[in-house]
């Protein structure tokens, strides 16, 4: 669902709060139902028991004792009377009155003819409050009053006034406040607990994201729940293993650089003795190509980083410098856009990255190139556009792989070693950016080089 939070913290807090809210609503509903049941039992069932007992006592007493029992019970004459005649019901009983009358009949010790009549809640009918009718004043006028009549064994008519329990009001304000406070406290506690559990995961994710650009970052604290601490310890071991492997590769690169270039130098010295000048030039050209391949391979294996230190670079001057170099090679290049502030970067690395992209557009794009500079608060974009045949969309990502060339020819005059784009992307990513291709409207290819203004931490350097 789109409305659900995407983070682990948000989802766990959301699920916890929903569970707490639902459980509290269920508990509150059960409490309200139980309160209504208890109130009806106290006001209904127990009242039926008291009235049934009173009727039984009056029925068993003599006429003189009956008056004494009524006086002893503290009942007002308006609530208990032996002078009224048997009334004829004027209207059908409501459900709650019928239920009360059934309970009363069940509670009688012996069968006695009883009936209930609905009375209008006025003062003349109700009389003042008493122990058997605990409702008085304005509240009594909200009740449904009954006249309960019992035909005693000697034919006398006992008439009692009884107020049915009123409908219960909704949840009280105190109950609602208590439930809301409980839900808020549970939500806050859940948010604190989930944040405490997920913060190590967030730290682990940030460390994994920055691992490619900084293998020397501090190790993660191995704290928190057992599973999180184990993941942090595994991550720290992986980081140490990667550093050892890269150090081993650095030593291997230094050895390869030395061992390959030394035989090339000996061959150059020996071909000077060749009398055939054409053969000598051909061999020298091959040696130059081999030396260039070694240099490009070493540059790629350094992941686009050398010992160059970051410095403030004028992006406008960098664009003009690259454009001048391309014009010297016969490229028709136009520059657009300006940068308002210098860029903190490794100048030579960025220059090589941009030169590789422009030279690629010159070679395969017909020599007509547009170089646009887009300035931003957090990043700068160098956009290189050509008007060549372009690259199929399915191949626009594969060309950044090492030694991949879309053309079948491997001749020196049509291209290099297939590492130019791989080196360009490595340099860009070493600056926290990237290189991407997209098709240009009207034909051709658009290469977008993104460089972040805030340079990430410098990764370990390779020797070579």
Image (cartoon, grey):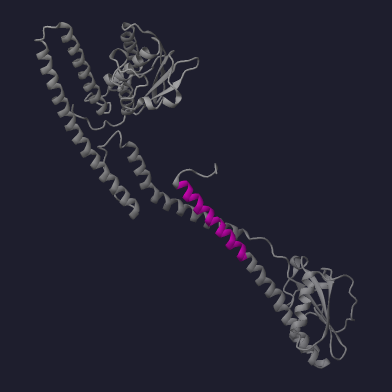
| Position of the N terminus by quadrant | top right
Q: Main secondary structure of the magenta part?
A: helix
Q: Nearer the viewer, residue 133 or 228?
A: 228
Q: Quadrant of residue 159?
A: bottom right
In the drawing, does residue 155 fall left or right of residue 192? right
In the drawing, does residue 235 fall left or right of residue 180? left
Q: Position of residue 136 (x, y in %)?
A: 74, 70
Q: Quadrant of residue 170?
A: bottom right
Q: Position of residue 380 (x, y in %)?
A: 39, 22
Q: Nearer the viewer, residue 230 or 137?
A: 230
What span is in magenta? Answer: 9-31
What residue is at 19 percent from the left and 29 percent from the top?
A: 253
Can residue 178 be spotted in the picture?
no
In the drawing, does residue 384 fall left or right of residue 64? left
Q: Quadrant of residue 173?
A: bottom right
Does 20 lie within the magenta span?
yes
């Amino acid at each position: 669902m789109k409305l659900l939070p995407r983070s682990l913290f948000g989802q766990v807090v959301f699920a916890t709060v929903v569970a707490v809210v639902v459980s509290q609503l269920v508990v509150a509903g059960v409490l309200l139902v139980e309160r209504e049941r208890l109130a009806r039992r106290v006001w209904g069932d127990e009242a039926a028991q008291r009235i049934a007992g009173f009727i039984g006592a009056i029925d068993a007493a003599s006429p003189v004792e009956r008056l004494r029992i009524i006086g002893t019970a503290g009942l007002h004459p308006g609530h208990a009377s032996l002078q009224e005649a048997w009334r004829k019901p004027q209207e059908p009983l409501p459900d709650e009155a019928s239920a009360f009358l059934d309970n009363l009949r069940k509670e009688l010790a012996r069968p006695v003819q009883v009936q209930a009549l609905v009375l209008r809640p006025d003062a003349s009918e109700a009389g003042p409050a008493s122990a058997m009718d605990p409702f008085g004043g304005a509240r009594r006028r909200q009740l449904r009053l009954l006249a309960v009549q019992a035909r005693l064994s000697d034919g006398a008519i006992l008439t009692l006034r009884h107020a049915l329990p009123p409908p219960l009001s909704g949840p009280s304000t105190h109950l609602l406040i208590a439930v809301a406070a409980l839900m808020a406290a549970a939500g806050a506690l859940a948010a604190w607990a989930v944040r405490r559990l997920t913060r190590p995961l967030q730290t682990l994710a940030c460390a994994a994201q920055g691992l490619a650009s900084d293998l020397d970052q501090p190790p993660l604290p191995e704290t928190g729940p057992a599973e999180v601490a184990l993941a942090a310890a595994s991550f720290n071991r992986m980081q140490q293993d990667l550093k050892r492997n890269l150090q081993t590769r650095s030593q291997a690169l230094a050895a390869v650089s030395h061992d390959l270039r030394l035989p090339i130098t000996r061959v150059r010295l020996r071909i000077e003795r060749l009398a055939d000048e054409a053969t000598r030039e051909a061999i020298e050209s091959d040696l130059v190509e081999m030396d260039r391949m070694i240099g490009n391979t070493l540059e790629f294996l350094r992941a686009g980083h050398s010992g160059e230190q970051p410095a403030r670079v004028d992006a406008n001057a960098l664009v003009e410098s690259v454009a001048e170099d391309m014009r010297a090679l016969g490229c028709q290049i136009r520059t657009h856009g300006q940068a308002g502030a210098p860029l903190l970067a490794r100048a030579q690395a960025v220059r090589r990255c941009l030169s590789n992209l422009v030279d690629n557009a010159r070679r395969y794009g017909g020599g007509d190139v547009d170089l646009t500079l887009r300035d931003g608060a957090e990043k700068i974009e160098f956009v290189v556009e050509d008007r060549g045949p372009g690259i199929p969309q399915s191949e626009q990502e594969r060309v950044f792989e090492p030694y991949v060339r879309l053309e079948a020819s491997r001749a020196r005059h049509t291209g290099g070693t297939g590492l130019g784009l791989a080196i360009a992307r490595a340099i860009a990513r070493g600056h926290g950016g990237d290189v991407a291709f997209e098709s240009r409207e009207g034909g051709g290819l658009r290469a977008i080089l993104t460089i972040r203004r805030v340079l990430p931490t410098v990764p370990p350097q390779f020797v070579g």
